[in-house]
């Protein structure tokens, strides 16, 4: 039986295309995949291990932190720190960056992540995900500084996510297409299943939480109204990675816009919107705040929120037109 390319084989073949590549980056992605396997194993038996339910603590944003959020955060840190390629890790679960530079002074990269997004869905067995973004350090030597993290999304060297769903998938881009790998738990390998993923130019799915209709601005209301009049159907999982991945495969648009309660939306720029924006643009789609491309934003704070409208090019352009025609500011 043809096994197909493993993630490691694929990464090494990709690395050979760049004669100056040192292999450090390949090692970093392999370690991310290792962490994903450990997290996937834990998620798949969470109900049995009584790992469900609130840790009782809260994260930096005052949100209840589920045990698996902490487990995922710790797993990435424990797996990636010894690798020596990273000088620091930023995580939704940690107020400040985790400095690794003491043990890896020659590290070239910083990693920003949402270790487990959508964790409120854990208890009800809905797909959840990890999202990551990697940049080259800008500071020269020593501990990582804010300039290493607050970089435009266009400077990402890699962006990816892991979807813990009916199967566990790892999807990533390094600027040379979007590639998807499916975990075969029987052999513990991520196997190439979706090479050069492309998002359909237009889709039939719109994804937004319509419970907030009364808080939307006129432009958002107008877009959703037109979507309803058209051929579209509504799908909303409430788990960003699941909603994004479905649209990447089938086409469609996901919107978490600014509204009267959240003028900057809910989702985080550095480790949610920006990596997914890099992936969707590499797959031929678009990602905008409604006023401009996500990847053109210059971040000001580690945990800053941003409105996110992302998906098929034509759908996002139509949504942008509605938002700008009916802009209230
Ligand atoms: P709402 C999950 O908590 C999350 O961060 C994303 O995964 C998801 O897209 C969004 O929030 C859902 O938010 O306000 O619709 O429940």
Image (cartoon, grey):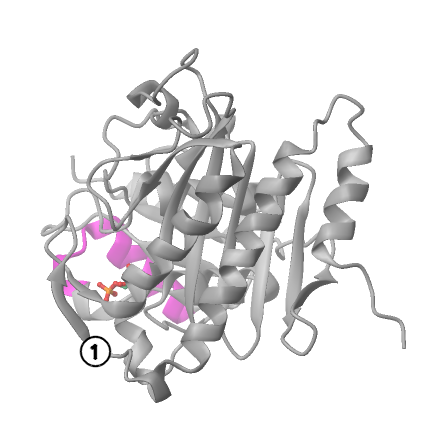
Helix, strand or loop for the magenta stretch, by majority = helix
Ligand 1 is found in which quarter of the picture? bottom left
Q: Position of residue 263 (x, y in %)?
A: 15, 43
Instruction: Choose between 39 and 233: the one closer to the eye.
Output: 39
Residue span colored magenta: 213-229
Q: Which residue is mark 1?
A: 53
Q: From what the image shows, is residue 190 above or below residue 9? A: below
Task: Please give the name of the residue rendered at 25% of the width and 69% of the height, measured from the top-left corner.
Answer: 67
Indicate the quadrant containing the C terminus: top left, top right, bottom left or bottom right. top left
Residue 27 lies in quadrant: top right
Task: Please give the name of the residue rendered at 70% of the width and 73% of the height, measured from the top-left corner.
Answer: 187
Instruction: Choose between 170 and 198: the one closer to the eye.
Output: 170
* Residue situated furthest bottom in the rendering: 48
Q: Is residue 208 left or right of residue 57?
A: right
State the SS at label 1: loop
* Residue situated furthest front in the rendering: 103
Queried whether the magenta region covers residue 220, the answer comes back as yes
Q: Position of residue 235 (x, y in %)?
A: 41, 73
Indicate the quadrant containing the N terminus: top left, top right, bottom left or bottom right. bottom right
Instruction: Choose between 313 and 277: the one closer to the eye.
Output: 277
Task: Please give the name of the residue rendered at 45% of the width and 66% of the height, measured from the top-left corner.
Answer: 39
* Residue 234 appears anywhere in the view: no
């Amino acid at each position: 039986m043809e096994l197909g390319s493993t993630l490691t084989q694929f990464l090494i073949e990709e690395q050979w295309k760049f004669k100056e590549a040192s292999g450090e980056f390949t090692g970093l992605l392999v370690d991310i995949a290792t962490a994903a396997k450990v997290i996937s194993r834990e998620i798949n038996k969470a109900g049995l291990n009584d790992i469900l339910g609130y840790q009782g603590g809260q994260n930096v944003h005052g949100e209840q932190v589920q045990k698996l959020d902490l487990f995922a955060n710790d797993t990435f840190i424990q797996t990636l720190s010894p690798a020596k390629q990273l000088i620091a890790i930023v995580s939704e679960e940690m107020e400040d960056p985790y400095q690794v530079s003491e043990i890896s002074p020659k590290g070239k990269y910083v990693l920003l992540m949402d270790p487990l997004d959508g964790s409120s869905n854990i208890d009800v067995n809905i797909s959840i995900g990890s999202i990551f973004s990697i940049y080259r350090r800008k500071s020269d030597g020593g501990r990582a500084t804010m300039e290493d993290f607050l970089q435009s999304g266009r400077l990402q060297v890699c962006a990816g996510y892991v979807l813990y769903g009916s199967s566990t998938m790892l999807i990533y881009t390094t600027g040379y297409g979007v590639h998807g790998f499916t975990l075969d738990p029987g052999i513990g390998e991520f196997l190439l299943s979706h090479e050069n993923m492309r998002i359909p130019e237009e889709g039939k799915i719109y994804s937004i939480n319509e419970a907030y209709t009364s808080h939307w601005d006129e432009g958002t209301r107008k877009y959703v109204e037109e979507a309803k009049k058209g051929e579209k159907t509504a799908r909303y999982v409430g788990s960003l990675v699941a909603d994004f991945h479905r649209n990447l495969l089938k086409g469609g648009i996901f919107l978490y816009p600014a509204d009267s309660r959240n003028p900057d939306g809910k989702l985080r720029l550095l480790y949610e919107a920006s990596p997914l924006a890099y992936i969707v643009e590499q797959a031929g789609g678009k990602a905008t705040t409604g006023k401009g491309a996500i990847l053109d934003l210059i971040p000001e704070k580690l945990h800053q929120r941003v409105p996110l409208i992302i998906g098929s090019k034509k759908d996002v352009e139509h949504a942008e037109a509605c938002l700008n025609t009916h802009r209230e500011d």
